[in-house]
C-alpha cells in the first residue's frame, strides 16, 4: 500500500465522495507501483543464451558487462540488473543520494552515496570510479548505464584545472542570476568531463543506457545532464549565457580560463554526434506513468483521459484550471461524459513572490487550488489526488493532497481558513485540517508528479441516494 | 470584421502557422458576432398576433409593455426590443455606461449614461426612474427587463437614510478589506432598494427578464446584483461579513444603523421566494459563446472541444496549463486526435503581488504564458487566440493575444525579452513586438473571455511542405 494514512483520508467522508476518494487512491497506487524502478528494469531487460535482450530495442551480445548506475533510482535499478545478469558483471558502481540505498554493495557492485542537490567529494569519487570503469570496457564488452533524476549532482568531474569548489561556486552564481535550467545545464556541460555525452565518448565497447526521466518533456539531454547523449550547445553558448546574466567576471578564474580555451578550440567540445555504439532507451517517464494510471482507471469503470504528460505552471492556478475542466465535465458532460478519470503528469511550480514560505509543496497547493474552485462551483462528484511520485512533495513529509467536494468545507469547520492558507503557501496546514493530506513515505520512484481527477456520473449519486434511502426505510 | 489589425497579425507568419492564425481569428470572430446583444435578443424574442413569444420560455400576453434595460449591453438589447414591439411600449429607460450608447433615445425610451465601476448621481437617477416605471406596470402589463454586466453600478438606489456617498464608502471599504465578490454583493443587496430581487417585488404585472451573463458560472443572483432574482443571503450574513473583515465600526453610521434595524426585522429583507409573475431567462453566457465557437470550428474542419466554460486562475499559469494540454494533443494525439480546436471560456486573473503593473491584461498574459510553454516544448502546429469578448483586455486598447509557434522567437528577434515582460506583467509590449497583439475596438458584447486553440495534424504540415516544394520546383 502506497498511502500510509488511508483511514484518516477517508474518515468523515461518506457515500459517493468516499467512493471517489478510494478510487483516486487506487489509481495512483497502481501507477506508482508500476513505475517502480526495479520492476521497470526487469520488464525491459532479460538475458537468454548469453544475449541481453531489451524490449523494443534489440539484442546485445557481449563478453563482459560493466555497470554504472547514477541517480535517485540507481540502487533499485542496479538490483534488477544484478538479478538478471549478476554473474556476468565484471565491475560496477552504484551512485545515489544519501539515504537512497539499502546496503554498501549490490552483488559485485560498490554503492556510493553522494551529495544532492549540491555535489560533494563523494560525487567526484563516484565519477572518478565511473571513468575508470568506462576505460576498462573492451570492444566486446558492454557498459550498462542506469540513469535517473539527480544524476547531475551525484556524478561530478570538473574539467582539469577546475576544482569542485569552483564548479559549485559557478553553479550557485547561475542559480542566483535567474538563469533557466537549460542555460545552467549548458554551462555545466562545458566545464564537466562527464556531462553532455563526454562520458560515453571514452567507452570503446557497446553502451546501453536505460533512462528514467524526471524531466518534463523527457528531453534526454537534460536527464542527469545527458552523460550518454549528444549535446547541441557549444562553448560560445556557455560564455554568452554567463555574459548575459552578467556573471562572467564573477565566476572563478579557473572556469573562465577553461571556457576561453574552449572558445579557441583548445578544449574538448561536448558530444556532437550520435555514437554508433551507444543505445539510449527511455524506460519510464511521466507519459508512461499517466498510461499506467489510465489503465487502472479503466478497470475501475472510469473513462481515462490523459490531459497532459507535460503539465507545468503555478501549482495553485493549474489546480484551478484543472477544476474548471472537471466542473465542465460534471455539469455539462463535455468534453467527456462521466464517469471520467482525468490524468495529468508533469511538474508544477510554487512561486513565493517575496512572501514567507509556509508549509506545503506543489502537489498540496495544486490540490488546494482545485478545492477552491470546487467550493465556488458548488459541484459534487469530483475528487482529485495530486502527488509527487517520489513520495516527497516540497520540503514536507507529505506526498500530496486528496481533495473532494466537501474538503474545503471540512477545513473551514475545523476553523482553518483555506483561502488564507492557500495564499500564504501553507497548504499543508489546510489539507491536514480537512483530512486531505496524503502520507506515503519514500516510494523508490521519481517520475515527476501526477494528478488523478475522478468524476462520477449524475447517475451514481442518484442511485447511491436511492439505495441509502431504501435501506434506511427498511431499518425504521 | 472583428479584428482590426489582421494584416499585422499575419505579417511575417507563413504556411501552416499563418493558416492556423487565420482560422483561430475566424472562429473567435464568429463567436463574438453571434453573441452580439441585439442579435441575441432578436433570436429569442418575437411577437405574433399581439403575443410576445420567447424561445424555450413560453408566450406572454400583455396589454402594455414597459422596458427597463440595465448594463453595458443595455443599448443594443433595447434597440432589438424596440424593433420587435416598439409600438406597444408605453415607457422605458435604458441605463448604460458612459460611451456605451449611440443616441439619447431608443424609440420612446430614454437613454441614461451613468458611472461604472463607481456609481454616480446618474446611477441613482436611473434607478429612481426605473422604480417609477415598475410601479406603473398594471396587472395586465408586462415589464421587460434587459439585464447585462455592469448593472450593479449603473442602477443604484440606497435604502432610505443612506446616501450614495455612504454606499460608495461602504463598497470601497469592502474592496480594500479583501472581502470576496460574493461577500461584497451580500452587503450591497442589504443596503439597496433594488438589488437582491427587491426591484421586481414592486411590480404587479408580468416580468420578463432577459439576462446576458458576464459572471463565471452564470449565477443569476450575481449578474447586475440580481434585481429580478431571489437572494439566499440575510441581514445576519451582511453584518457578519462586515464584522469578520473588521470594518463594522468603520462603515458610515447610516449604513450600520440600517443594518441593525434589519437584524431586528424592522427593514425589508431581499427577495426570498420565486415570484410567480417573474420569468428569468438567460440568453447568453460563456457556455453559449463556447458553443458558437465550436460550431464555427467544426465548419473549418477542426474537431471542437469545449474544455471549460468556467475557466479561472492566474492568467499566465492558465496559459501554461492550456499549452500543456495542447502540446500533448499535438505530440501524442491524446486525449484528442488533431485537427482539434480547444475552446475555453471564463475569466482569468492577473495578480500583481506588489510588483509595478506593466501594460497588459488577462488575455494578453494568458497568450504569452501559452507562448512560453510552446517555445519550451519546441512544438509547431499550435495557435491560441485569447480575447476579452468586450474588446478591452485590461486597461489597454488591445482585446487579447494571438500566439503561435514562432511568436516567442519573433519577440526575441525584436530584442524584447518575452520572459522578462511576462514576469513584469508587461505582456502588451512583448506581444506587440511579435505581431501578436489583437486590436478590435469595443464589440458591444460582454460575455467574459474566450480562448481558442487550434491544433493541426502532422499531415497538414507534411502536405503543406510538399506542395510548397513542388511549386518552388516549378519556378526554378
Image (cartoon, coloured by chain):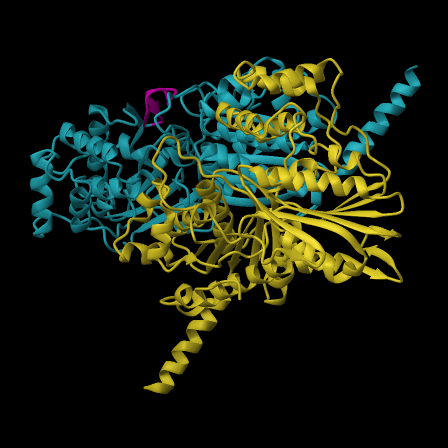
Chain colours: A cyan, B yellow
Q: Nearer the viewer, residue A326 or B230?
A: B230
Q: Residue A153, how many percent across, how many down?
A: 27, 31
Is A100 contained in the magenta span? yes
A417 above or below B49? above
Q: Is residue A308 left or right of residue B472?
A: right
- Can I make out residue A171 in this image? yes
A270 above or below A436? below
Q: Residue at x 54, y 27 (%)?
A: A368
Q: Residue at x 28, y 52 (%)?
A: B416
Q: Residue B65, how many percent across, how many down?
A: 81, 51
Q: Residue B98, how many percent across, how many down?
A: 54, 48
Q: Residue at x 67, y 39 (%)?
A: B127
B194 above or below B346? above
Is B323 contained in the magenta span? no
Q: Is residue A71 left or right of residue A162?
A: right
Q: Nearer the viewer, residue B442 or B404?
A: B442
Q: Quadrant of residue B279?
A: top right
Q: Nearer the viewer, residue A71 or B221?
A: B221
Q: Residue at x 81, y 57 (%)?
A: B88
State which region is magenta: A96-107
Q: Which image quarter is the C terminus of chain B in? A: bottom left
- Can I make out residue A340 in this image? no
Q: Residue A216, how many percent across, how many down?
A: 41, 42
B360 above or below B178? below
Amino acid at each position: 500500500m502506497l498511502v500510509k494514512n488511508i483511514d484518516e483520508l477517508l474518515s468523515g467522508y461518506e457515500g459517493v465522495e468516499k467512493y471517489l476518494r478510494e478510487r483516486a487512491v487506487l489509481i495512483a497506487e497502481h501507477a506508482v507501483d508500476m513505475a517502480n524502478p526495479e520492476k521497470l528494469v526487469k520488464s525491459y531487460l532479460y538475458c537468454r543464451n548469453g544475449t541481453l535482450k531489451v524490449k523494443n530495442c534489440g539484442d546485445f551480445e557481449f563478453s563482459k558487462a560493466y555497470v554504472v548506475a547514477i541517480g535517485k533510482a540507481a540502487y533499485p535499478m542496479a538490483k534488477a540488473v544484478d538479478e538478471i545478469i549478476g554473474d556476468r558483471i565484471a565491475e560496477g558502481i552504484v551512485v545515489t543520494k544519501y539515504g537512497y540505498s539499502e546496503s554498501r554493495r549490490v552483488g559485485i557492485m560498490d554503492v556510493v552515496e553522494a551529495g544532492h542537490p549540491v555535489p560533494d567529494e563523494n560525487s567526484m569519487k563516484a565519477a572518478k570510479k565511473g571513468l575508470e570503469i568506462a576505460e576498462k570496457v573492451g570492444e566486446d564488452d558492454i557498459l550498462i548505464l542506469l540513469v535517473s533524476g539527480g544524476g547531475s549532482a551525484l556524478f561530478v568531474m570538473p574539467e582539469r584545472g577546475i576544482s569542485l569548489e569552483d564548479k559549485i561556486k559557478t553553479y550557485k552564481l547561475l542559480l542566483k542570476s535567474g538563469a533557466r535550467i537549460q542555460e545552467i545545464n549548458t554551462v555545466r556541460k562545458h566545464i564537466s568531463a562527464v556531462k553532455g555525452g563526454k562520458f560515453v565518448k571514452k567507452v570503446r565497447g557497446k553502451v546501453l543506457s536505460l533512462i528514467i526521466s524526471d524531466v518534463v518533456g523527457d528531453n534526454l539531454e537534460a536527464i542527469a545532464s545527458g552523460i550518454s547523449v549528444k549535446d547541441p550547445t557549444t562553448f560560445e553558448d556557455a560564455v554568452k549565457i554567463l555574459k548575459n546574466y552578467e556573471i562572467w567576471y564573477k565566476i572563478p578564474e579557473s572556469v573562465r580560463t577553461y571556457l576561453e580555451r574552449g572558445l579557441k578550440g583548445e578544449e574538448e567540445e561536448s558530444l556532437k554526434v550520435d555514437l554508433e555504439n551507444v543505445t539510449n532507451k527511455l524506460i519510464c517517464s511521466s507519459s508512461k506513468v499517466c498510461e499506467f494510471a489510465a489503465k487502472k482507471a479503466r478497470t475501475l469503470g472510469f473513462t481515462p483521459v490523459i490531459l497532459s504528460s507535460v503539465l507545468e505552471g503555478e501549482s495553485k492556478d493549474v489546480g484551478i484550471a484543472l477544476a474548471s475542466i472537471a466542473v465542465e465535465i460534471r455539469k455539462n458532460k463535455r468534453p467527456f461524459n462521466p464517469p471520467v478519470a482525468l490524468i495529468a503528469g508533469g511538474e508544477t511550480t510554487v512561486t513565493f513572490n517575496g512572501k514567507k514560505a509556509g508549509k506545503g509543496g506543489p502537489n498540496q497547493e495544486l490540490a488546494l487550488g482545485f478545492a477552491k474552485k470546487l467550493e465556488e462551483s458548488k459541484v459534487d462528484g469530483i475528487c482529485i489526488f495530486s502527488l509527487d511520485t517520489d513520495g516527497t512533495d516540497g520540503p514536507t513529509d507529505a506526498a500530496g493532497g486528496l481533495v473532494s467536494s466537501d474538503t474545503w468545507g471540512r477545513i473551514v469547520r475545523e476553523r482553518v481558513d483555506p483561502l488564507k492558507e492557500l495564499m500564504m503557501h501553507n497548504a499543508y496546514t489546510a489539507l491536514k485540517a480537512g483530512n486531505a493530506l496524503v502520507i506515503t513515505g519514500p516510494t523508490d520512484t521519481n517520475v515527476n508528479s501526477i494528478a488523478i481527477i475522478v468524476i462520477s456520473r449524475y447517475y451514481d449519486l442518484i442511485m447511491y441516494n436511492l439505495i441509502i434511502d431504501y435501506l434506511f426505510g427498511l431499518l425504521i
